[in-house]
Image: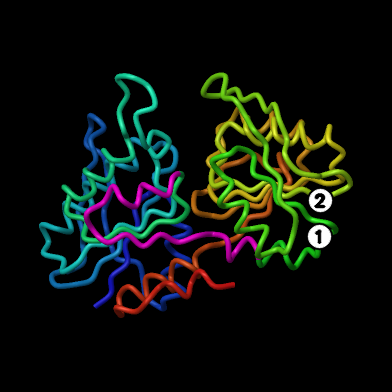
């Protein structure tokens, strides 16, 4: 039997997934002890059930990661048959390798913690780095927001579109978008000055009088997109849009992005968008249907590969 639960990170998305599946969210109590420790109690009987816990690691990430681990531990001790962690946004993914001496690999650390807590399977979307799938010794179903975003972009009938990767690491994603949109392709080379400052310094591709679509998996400070948009504007781009899966905006990003040359931000609801009204021209696309279908297929032991088709 299928049971869907949600943590406190994104209950709106979890509700949409449950409605699409035609089930009710499971009853779970998530409270705090007086000193701030997380207290969890699952009110439903889940013995022998196929349970899914929906919890992206959005702000505040430490709270939501720990909350997810405690819920999974409670489910394991309640004798659930299978526990699938549904993480629309997998946080702590920026450090996926040792690129400097004496630094951690936090993406692998979180993977270890999830497995140690009792996770049987992971369902996620648009990892910051594809190799994170290999950090797990349990099955991982990795979805892409591409079908949802491409459908919206096609409906806009953009004139002379060019898909632009704001950094070399996003080239594979940009190439996929360009093929699906039958558009041109360009890439911006960048250099990160600090965790919040980025300098874009080179552009490969023709964007003059084109509609540029900046694609990325994650936006936090907005530094990468703003620097790329500035370079595109200088190169003669007619219009600039940004299509990003995870809109993990920090407050300082709003003013920076508001002053950029980007005319529309297309994002998903993988994380809740907590933004002052009329701050940015943002269009939010829901991935609830995509995750619901993936959960349905996982529960029925069916293939999820067709979810990548557009």
* Residue drawn where x is 21% and y is 66% of the image: 44
Q: Is residue 174 magenta?
A: no
The magenta segment is 129-150
Q: Is residue 108 above or below residue 255?
A: below
Residue 172: % across, % down:
56, 51
Determine whether the residue tagged by mark 1 lies in a helix, strand or loop.
loop
Residue beneath label 2, please? 211
Which mark sits nearer the N-terminus, 1 or 2?
Answer: 1
Q: Quadrant of residue 109?
A: top left
- Single out the residue that lies furthest toward the front: 204
In the figure, is residue 251 to the left or right of 61? Answer: right
* Residue drawn where x is 81% and y is 51% of the image: 211
* Residue drawn where x is 73% and y is 42% of the image: 278
Q: Residues within 10 Å of mark 2 (few under 14, many from 20)?
A: many
Residue beneath label 1, please? 158
Q: Quadrant of the N terminus?
A: bottom left
- Please tell me which residue lies in front, 102 or 203: 203
- Please tell me which residue lies in front, 206 or 117: 206
Residue 89: % across, % down:
44, 49
* Residue drawn where x is 40% and y is 56% of the image: 124
Contact (CB < 8 A) between labels 1 and 2?
yes
């Amino acid at each position: 039997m299928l049971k869907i639960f949600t943590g406190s990170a994104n209950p709106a998305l979890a509700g949409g997934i449950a409605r699409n599946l035609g089930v009710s969210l499971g009853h779970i109590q998530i409270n705090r002890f007086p000193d701030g420790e997380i207290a969890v109690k699952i009110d439903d009987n889940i013995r022998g059930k196929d349970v899914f816990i929906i919890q992206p690691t959005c702000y505040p990430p430490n709270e939501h990661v720990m909350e997810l681990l405690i819920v999974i531990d409670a489910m394991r001790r309640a004798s659930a048959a299978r526990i699938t962690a549904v993480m629309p946004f997998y946080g702590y993914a920026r450090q996926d390798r040792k690129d400097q001496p004496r630094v951690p690999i936090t993406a692998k650390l979180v993977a270890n913690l999830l497995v140690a807590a009792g996770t049987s399977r992971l369902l996620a979307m648009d990892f910051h780095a594809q190799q994170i799938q290999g950090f797990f010794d349990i099955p991982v179903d990795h979805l892409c927001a591409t079908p949802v975003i491409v459908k919206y972009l096609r409906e806009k009938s953009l004139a002379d579109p060019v898909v632009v990767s704001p950094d070399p690491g996003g080239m594979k994603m940009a190439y996929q978008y360009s093929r699906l949109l039958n558009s041109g392709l360009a890439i911006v080379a960048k250099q990160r000055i600090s965790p919040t400052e980025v300098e874009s310094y080179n552009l490969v591709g023709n964007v003059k009088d084109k509609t540029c679509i900046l694609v990325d998996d994650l936006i936090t400070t907005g530094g990468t997109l703003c620097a790329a948009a500035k370079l595109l504007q200088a190169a003669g781009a007619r219009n600039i849009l940004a299509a990003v899966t995870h809109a993990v905006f920090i407050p300082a990003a709003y003013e920076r992005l508001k002053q950029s040359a980007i005319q529309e931000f297309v994002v998903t609801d993988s994380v809740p968008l907590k933004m002052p009204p009329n701050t940015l021209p943002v269009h939010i696309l829901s991935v609830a249907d995509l995750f619901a279908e993936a959960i349905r297929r996982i529960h029925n032991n069916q293939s999820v590969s067709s979810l990548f088709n557009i």
